[in-house]
Amino acid sequence: MVKGCLTALIFFIAIFVIIAVIPERRLHEKVRKADHAAILSACRSIISNSIASNRPPFSIGRGDPLFTNTVPSPILNLSPAYVTIMPDHAMICLSALPRVYVLAFATNAVQYGGEKLIDGLWLSHGPRQDYEALKTKNK
């Protein structure tokens, strides 16, 4: 009985490592090797173009026919699932499982995230949780 439970536990740990840990490390490596300044510049360009055209916040995903025409190559090089553009930041979703995002902030915007890559660009595993942590910290 104990041996069977131990075998099942080891099996589930191995599956978790294969599904979540290994892909997460690959994504982190991809982000760390990327041109951070180019990604930030591309995001800021999309943000400012959206503000100038009075476009409301929007998301564009890999399946959208306009995806490759709308999203600049420094962002496309990360192979995102989708990109969300807000008035003060862009959120690049690289993976939903494991959760890996790159957050790019407009100039002078309040910044948050899990790991600062450069000023204005952050790696995150939960943008909402990172934002809530910032709000709690600033109280």
Image (cartoon, grey):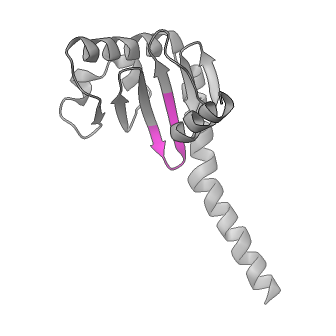
| Residue 68 percent location from the top left of the image | 25, 26
Question: Compared to 34, does 41 lie above or below?
Answer: above
User: Can you tell which quarter of the image residue 33 is in?
Assistant: top right
Q: Could you tell me residue 124's position as x and y percent?
A: 57, 34
Above or below, comparing residue 18 to residue 139 in the picture: below
Q: Does the magenta stretch include residue 50?
A: no
Question: Is residue 97 in the magenta section?
Answer: yes
Q: In which quarter of the image is the N terminus?
A: bottom right
Please tell me whether the stretch drawn in magenta is mainly helix, strand or loop. Answer: strand
- Given residues 12 and 125, the one toward you in this image is 125
Q: In this view, does 74 lie to the left or right of 135?
A: left
Residue 93 vertical placement versus 2 (above, below): above
Chain part drawn in magenta: 94-102
Please indicate whether residue 4 sits to the left or right of residue 110 in the image. right
Image check: 104 left or right of 70? right
Point 44% across, 36% down: residue = 93
Residue depicted at 32% across the width and 16% down the height: 46
What is the residue that sits farthest to the right in this orientation? 2
- Between 22 and 89, the one lying in front of the other is 89
